[in-house]
Structures are given as structure tokens and as C-alpha cells.
Image: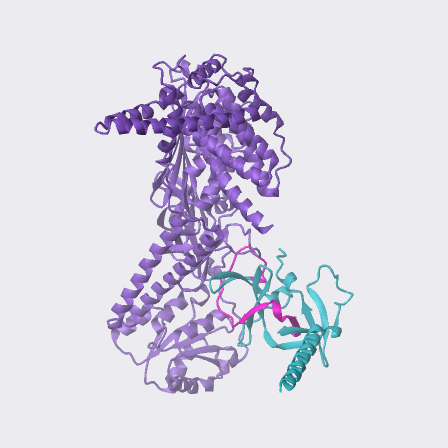
Chain colours: A cyan, B purple
Amino acid sequence: MSDKLKEIINKQSDSQNVDMNQLDDVVQLVGFVIGDEEYAIPILSIQEIIKPFSWTRVPQVPKYVLGVFNLRGAVIPLIDLRAKFGLQTKKQSDETRFIVMRHEDDVAGFVIDRLTMAIRIKKTNIGPPPDTIDSDDTIIDGVGKQEDKIITILKVNKLLERDF
Amino acid sequence: MDEFQEILQDFLIESFELVEKLDEDLVELENNPEDLELLNGIFRVAHTVKGASSFLNFDVLTHLTHHMEDVLNKARHGELIITPDIMDVVLESIDLMKALLETIRDTSADAGIDVAACVVRLDKISGGDGEVDTPVAAAPVIEEVVEAVEEDDDMDYDNMSPDDLEAEIEKLLQERQSEDKAKRQAKIAAGEEVLTAPPSPDEVEESSAAEPTPAAAPKPPAPAPAPTPVKKAEEPKAAAPAKRAPATVEQTIRVDVKRLDHLMNLIGELVLAKNRLIKINDDVEERYEGEEFLEELNQVVSIVSLVTTDLQIAVMKTRMLPIGKVFNKFPRMIRDLSRELNKKIELEISGEETELDKSIVEEIGDPLVHIIRNSCDHGVETPEERVAKGKDETGVIGLKAYNEGNQIVIQIDDDGKGLDTDMLKNKSLEKGIITEKEADSMSDKEAFGLIFKPGFSTAAAVTNVSGRGVGMDVVKTNIEKLNGIIDIDSEIDVGTSMKLKIPLTLAIIQALLVGVQEEYYAIPLASVLETVRISKEEIYTVEGKSVMRLREEVLSLVHIGDIFEVERILDASEHAYVVVLGLGTSKLGLIVDTLVGQEEIVIKSLGDYLKGIEGVAGATIRGDGGVTLIVDVVALMSMARDVKATTMIDSSSESAGVTEKTKASDYTVMIVDDSKTDRTIMRKALEPLGVTLIEASDGQEALNILKSGDHNFDGMLVDIEMPRMDGYTLATEIKKYNKYKNLPLIAVTSRTGKSDRMRGVESGMIEYITKPYSADYLSSVVVRNINFKAEFL
């Protein structure tokens, strides 16, 4: 009996180890769409995803900073990624979401057009940003290749960096 | 290691607390060199620090405090008189001690500070070889006293090394103790003898209680009425309980400041929730008027808001510190300054028990140092000058603190030469801070304000004390950072008085909420002097700036919309409100569209991403959950200078973009009705025209569609009775927008009363169709009102 138990336990821990190993070279991302492109950010840098609500305009900031909003008592900046990426501003729809991202102590909300899905992608399938992009200053972390498409993975710390 | 850190922390906290009190005591001691209690207290500090530091292996600190202790011990035993020169050395050593403690705090080691020079000086004093100005006359006298007390005390103190001295003192103490014991036994024996006559112990006590004064007083050449050796030996014992008595320990616990900050944040949240609750309560009251549960709800809401307010005050109080903590260092500073400047200055402190928020207490110290230095250096004259002016030789600087409403006032007065407005103006002209014209039109108050201008310094010669030209303007910015203001009053040869008015706490403030277009801003109430309602005609333009006449003054104006780049979508009304802002002596009128009211707001930072936006001090969360920005009045004042007067320009020119209609579907009409059936009937009636139809089920939805700007409407059919927002309100709201001023609104309703029609007209409806109506009639009314081109029919 106890042998059997041991066997089961061993098996379980083995399978867990396997899982862990698999996790090691898999990155979990959340994909979203802005304009026609699909982007993704690491799932761990997302604090929450919320439906849009009202915000307050802040003067003397670039157009892509919409203002600030109240997230359960905290005042958080709201950034329109469409505007930041140089696209025409679009009216918010039912699919519009605010993604609240966090990197260390910096938090900000980002307006995106639509969420796609949570993505697991092998590290080996992620390539560096294209050579045409200056690697120091870019907000692109890498390019994830999937069967039928490619996804641009963004650097959250760069997104949260003030650049004005 | 951790344990060591813990001990070290405790040691530092304790030491800093002790040292802080030390400064004050030492200066006090200089005035009353005979005060044994003070001396004992000071000695104990040195002793405690020495003990702890030797335990923690801080050798330099131990070395220094050890020598300090020697000097103080001598003074304590009346072997040394504290003269100003000795005091200088003692104070110097205390400064060193502070520096060492700070080094320890920062680096956990006490290396890097040289104490040798100071130790030598201390040694000289305690060695008493007379060279360091030890009053030669006094020393032998004291020795005599000591000799008279202790027969076997024939040691030569002058030639003793400090260590030997310590040993000697130790020995003496032991001797005294044993002697004391013997004496006590004798007393008991005596008590037994005179059991029926109690006055005798009383007598002993009385004499011993009265004794310290003459014995400790080193002045009399010999202990005149010859206190017997027995009594002398008793002295330290008598003094000890006397000083212990007043030191009743307060019941306190130490709390990490972070926890208090966290608590304060939570209270902030609670205040916001309370505001929100009150707002909801108002809404509910309106909607369910007369319902029974309302009263109960009212009660709960008022209890919650009451308790929240109390809680907020209680937590604020836990963060309060007496301002005496800051004031403590000034007696010492004044003493040093008066010696340095060869002036006689006395400091009078009052109200040191007045309490302020911890964060403010930390910030207020430096500005005060600056102001007091300035008073000493530029304010108070030299003794000769003072005598010549017929004033007392000693100048007095008064430092007091008191509460005034929601503010605390710190007042610094001096009886010096006062501020000379002509001199101030000339100086500013020279330095190009003001123009000739400004100088002429300047009031005295404004002239006093010049000392806060950057680059201004009235000291002809730059001294060590002040006058480097960075000073008062920094003071001003620092005070303004705390939302405080400075008020100066001065009279030549009588003195200068400065009042710093500072809010009690930084986190929660009273604010005036103002509206501009569809936005709201909060202005700290402390900077609001008054509000006035004006009409457009009252605004004049002078040299491209808007101004208005406010009683006898000319007030410069700026529109809040120009400062914060507010888009003007709403029609400016005939009237506006001016919020008169005051900061020190400068004033500014801020034009706003509406005044919302006064509210208690919790200041929140905008975070790193948005920090440093000019004119915005932070944000707060309002009762409705929205975010409102807080105006930074200081920045606003300077921004106002660069803003051109675009105020109140009639913006009706920018009308809705009229595009050429090329087909029937270019016309867009909105149908607003809560009934689906009615909407369908209207749709059916209008569809034959071929116009585009948009439906909304109530006023609010209609307004949102309008605001979104997705369509350019040519007309609207509006039902009157609708949930959320009725037709009248909708019409009034729509007419507020410049863009829709000329949008034809057609009421479609079953209300037929005359007063209903009147209300319709008042709210801006141009046609009134009563249900039921024929489809043809409806379509003809619409065609007429939207200027539908005949060729599309």
C-alpha cells in the first residue's frame, strides 16, 4: 500500500517537475490589438484589465496622455496607445479596455482597442526586434512567431517611462 | 548582527533625543550656572551616551564623551564655574558628539571625525590649570570648599589626569556613601533617643533641603554659615530625589512613522468614501422624497460622517508634534550668533507646546533658521547703535506659535531697525529686480515683499551669518510648499514682525471647487481671499492683460481656461466668477465659470509619470469617484504672467461645420423618446423623407450621442417625459453648447397645458407637437425646421 502511495507521489512530483521545466522556456503573454496590429505584454506585468470609464484631462501633456483616472482610490495616468503609436484616435467601443500595467512602483492604464487572448509561446519562438529598429530606444522587446501570424511583444518598463 | 542593529537603533534614537534637549539645557545653564539640577541632567546625558557607546565599541565617541563627562562632573560638584568660555568648549564638544552620532547613524561607525583638539581643550578645563580662562579666583575657592568638606581631600586636582580624577571621584563617592551610612545610623540612634520629639528629623531635612543653594553657589569666598561636613555629604542625596520628582514618565509607545502614514492614507480613503456617501444620500433623498427609510439612512450617514471627522482629527493628532522640537535649537543659535556678531540678543519663546503635523515640523526648521539669522544679522542693531537710539542695549527676538482657525501661526518679532522701504526699493532697482515704475506704485507691504525676491540681499557685506543672497526667497518657496504664507510688518527703528501661516496638516485640506466648461478644479482655500461675481463689461484690457477694478485696487485677471488649455465648447455666459487668490502680498484674480463649493479634499500625488506639471499640485478623488486636479497657486501666479488675455472672447464664430447636403440621407435627425412604440411611429413618419434617423431612449443617452460628435444633427424630436433626464433639461443642456445653439429642437408630447408649452419655449424648443399627430404633419414640421431642400422631396 505504502509502496503504491509512494509511487503515485513520485509520479506526481515527476509530472510537476516536467511542468516546471516546460514553464521555464514558455512565456505567458496577453495579446491585444491596436489598429491592425497585434501586440502582447507579459502576463505578470498586468495588474488588471478593466472596462473603460471616465477620466480627467490633465493639461500640458502630449496628446496620447488622456489624463488620470481613479482606480479604487489611487490616481493613475491613462495613456492612449493608438495615439502613442501615431494612429488616428478612434471612438471607444464595447471592446475597448484599459490595461493597468505595473513595473516596480510605476503604474499606468493603457487604452487598447480589443483584447485577443492569453498566449503561451516558447522562448525559442521569440526573435529579437527587427534590425531596422534602434535597439536601445525601442519599446519592442521581441517578435513572437506563431503558426499563422507574428506578435510584437512590448517592453512594459519602456511603456511606463515618461518620455516628455 | 541583527541584534546589534536593533541595539544600535535604540541607542541612536535615545541619544538624539537626549542631545536635542541638551542644547537648550546648556544655554539655560549659562544663565544659571548654579542650577544643580540642570547640571545633573546634562551630566547624565554625557554619561549615558558614554556608557552606551563604549558598550557598542564606538571608541571615538566614548573618548569624547568621557572627557565631557569629566568637565561636567567637576561643574556638578561645584569645582568649576561655567563661564561663557568654558561653555563654548562644552558646546563645541556637544556639536562634535552630534556629528559623531550622525556619522554612526549613516555609516554605523564613528570614524572620520577628529575630536583630539576638543578633547585637549576639555582636558585643560577639567585639568583646571587655568590657561583656558578658567577663572583663577574661583578655582581655589572651590577647592577650599571641598577641602573643608573632606579632610583627607588633599589631592592636587590641578595635576591629576582625567582618569585619576575619575578614580578619585569614585573613591570619594564611596567614602561619602559609607560616611552617609554611619550618619544614618547615628540619626536612627538619635531618633530613638528623642522619640517623642519629631521636629528634630524635620530640622535635618529642612536644612539639607535648603542647603544645596549656598553650597553649590561657588561665589561666596568660603561656605559662610559653615555647613557642617555631615550636611555637605548629604547633599547629593538630597538633590537626587528632588530632581526625580518632576520627571513623571508619560505613558507612551514608539510607533513606526510608516504605520502612521499608512493610517493617514486609510483615513484619507475613508474621507473620500464619506464624501461619496453624502452625495449618494442627497441623490436618494431627492428621488425617494418622503419615504420612511430615508430618515434612518440620514441618521446613519450623519453618524458615519461625524465619526469619520473625529477619526480624522484623532489620527491627525497622533502625527502631531509640539513645535518646541524645532524651537529648541534656537536659544543655542541665538547665543552663538550674538557672540559672533557682538550683539546682545535675547530670545523669548512662547507657545512651544503648539502642535503641528510631523511632516511640517520637519520642513519648518530651515526657513525659521533663516528668518531668525536674518533678524539677528540685519534686524537687531549693535549695542552702541541701540543705546544711541535710546533703546535697551539688549535686543529681543520673539518667537511664538499659536493656533488661528485651521492654521498655525509662527510669529518672529524683533525690536531692531525695521525695514526701510526706500532702501529696499533702491536696492531692488539697482539689482534690476523691479522697474522704476513699479517702485513708484509700490505699497509698503509690497516693498517688504521685495526681500523674498530671488537675488535680493540687504547686507552690504556678506557675513558668515546671512546675506549670501540665497535666503529669503528660499524661505518663501519652502513655506509656500507647505501651503503656507508669509506676512511681513515693519516699522523703522521699532522692529519687524513676520508671520508664517501654515496649515495644520498637509494631507487633507479645505478647497474651493470651481468649474470651467465641463471641468472642475480644486483651489486650496488657504490661498483664496474672496470670490466676486462680475459681468463681462467689468473686465478691462491693459497692455494685453485683463484687469478689473476691485474696490480701490486694480486686480489682474487670468482665465483658468487659458492656464489649463481648456477647450471652450460651452457658451460663455454673461457673468463669470472671479476667485481672488492671495499669496503673501501678491494677488491675482482667477476667472472661472462656476463656483461649486467648499469641500474637504485629500491630496493625492499624480505619480512619477505625470509629476511636475506646472500649475497642478496634485489630484483628489471626489464624492462621485471622479478625479479633480488641485491648483498649485504658487505656480499659477507665475504662469499668469505669460498668459495673454484671451479671456471671454466671444467664441460664437466657431459654429458647427456646415457641409453641403448632396442627398437626403445627409440630413440627420435624432428621435428621443422612452417609448419604443412612439419612436417607431416617428420613424415610420420620417422614413419616406430618406433622412438618417438616430434613436435615443432618454435625455442622458441623447446628450451622450450629441457629445460624442459622431453625427452632425440637423434636428431633434424630443419627448418631454422621460426617465433619467427629461426633455426640458435636455434642451437646456443642449443649448449650453455653442455648437448646438441653433439646433432645432421639436417637442413631441402629450402634455398640452399652456405652462408646459411655456416651459418648452423657455428651455429652447422651437416647435411643439402634441400627441397624437398625423405622420404628414410631423414630417412637414421636420422638413420646415431642418431646411430640407425641396429637390430631395
In the image, what residue occupies the spot 65% across and 77% down?
Answer: A119
Q: Position of residue B600 (x, y in %)?
A: 38, 54
* Observer-nearest of B143 and A129: B143
Residue B46 covered by magenta stretch: no
* Observer-nearest of A106 and B518: A106
The answer to which image quadrant residue B189 occupies is top left
Q: Position of residue B545 (x, y in %)?
A: 48, 44
Q: How many marks?
A: 0
Q: Is residue B772 above or below residue B273?
A: below
In the image, what residue occupies the spot 53% across and 31% down?
Answer: B94
Extreme residue in the left direction: B196
Q: Position of residue B191 (x, y in %)?
A: 28, 28
Q: Is residue B523 above or below residue B16?
A: below
Does the image show residue B341?
A: no
Task: Please indicate whether residue B628 sits to the left or right of residue B772 in the image.
Answer: right
Task: Please indicate whether residue B81 sits to the left or right of residue A16 in the image.
Answer: left
**Which residues lie in the magenta part?**
A36-65
Task: Please indicate whether residue B68 sits to the left or right of residue B571 in the image.
Answer: right
The answer to which image quadrant residue A130 occupies is bottom right
Residue A45 covered by magenta stretch: yes
Q: Position of residue B349 (x, y in %)?
A: 39, 31
* Observer-nearest of B642 and B34: B34
